[in-house]
Image (tube, grey):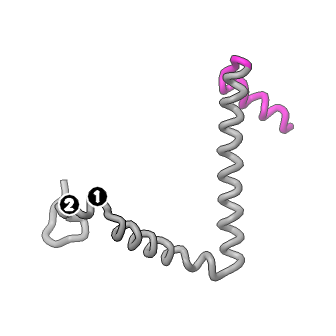
Amino acid sequence: MVSGHGSDTDVSSDPDEEFPTKTNWRKSMRETLATFDFATRDAVIASLVLTFLISKVGRQSNNILFQYVSKRYGWELSQVRANYTMRLY
């Protein structure tokens, strides 16, 4: 339950906020891009962000590969992960 008078936690009953229009979406995108503007100005931060994104994509591709192997060979996911881990060492 939200309580308080005029606080930032009040729930808005404006129907336009619930279903964003094209204009609201564009405004939201501009605000989001402005928030991340600092990352594009500094090459070190941009390279760190890129590294983290690539790492995340790599982990997700492993999950998809594990699911494929599990389905293809009828193994449990735990078996696939254990075999993968053993192969690393």
x, y percent for residue 71: 67, 22
Q: Residue furthest front?
A: 22
What kind of secondary structure does the magenta stretch mostly adopt?
helix
For badge 2, the amino acid type reads Pro
Q: Nearer the viewer, residue 46 or 7?
A: 46
Q: What secondary structure is found at the residue carrying circle 1?
A: loop
Label 2 sits on a secondary structure element that is: helix
The answer to whether 12 is drawn above or below residue 83 in the figure is below
Q: CA distance from mark 2 to mark 1?
A: 7 Å
Q: Nearer the viewer, residue 17 or 56?
A: 17
- Residue 87 lies in magenta, yes or no? yes
The local crowd at label 2, few if under 14, some if 14 to 19, many if 20 or more residues have their Cα within 10 Å, is few
Q: Does the image show residue 11?
A: no
Looking at the image, do the residues carrying marks 2 and 1 touch, with CB atoms under 8 Å apart?
Answer: yes
Three-letter amino acid code of the residue under disc 1 = Phe
Picture quadrant of residue 88: top right
> What residue is shown with label 1?
19
Q: Residues within 10 Å of mark 1 (few under 14, many from 20)?
A: few
Count of numbered tags: 2
Front-most of residues 67 and 5: 67
Q: Read off the residue under disc 2.
A: 15
Residue pictured at 82% horizontal, 32% vertical: 86
Give the residue at x 65% y 66%: 49
Q: Which residues are magenta?
A: 73-89
- Residue at figure coordinates x 36%, y 66% from the top left: 22
Please state the horizontal and vertical placement of residue 18, each as a whole percent of the image. 26, 58
54 vs 85: above or below: below
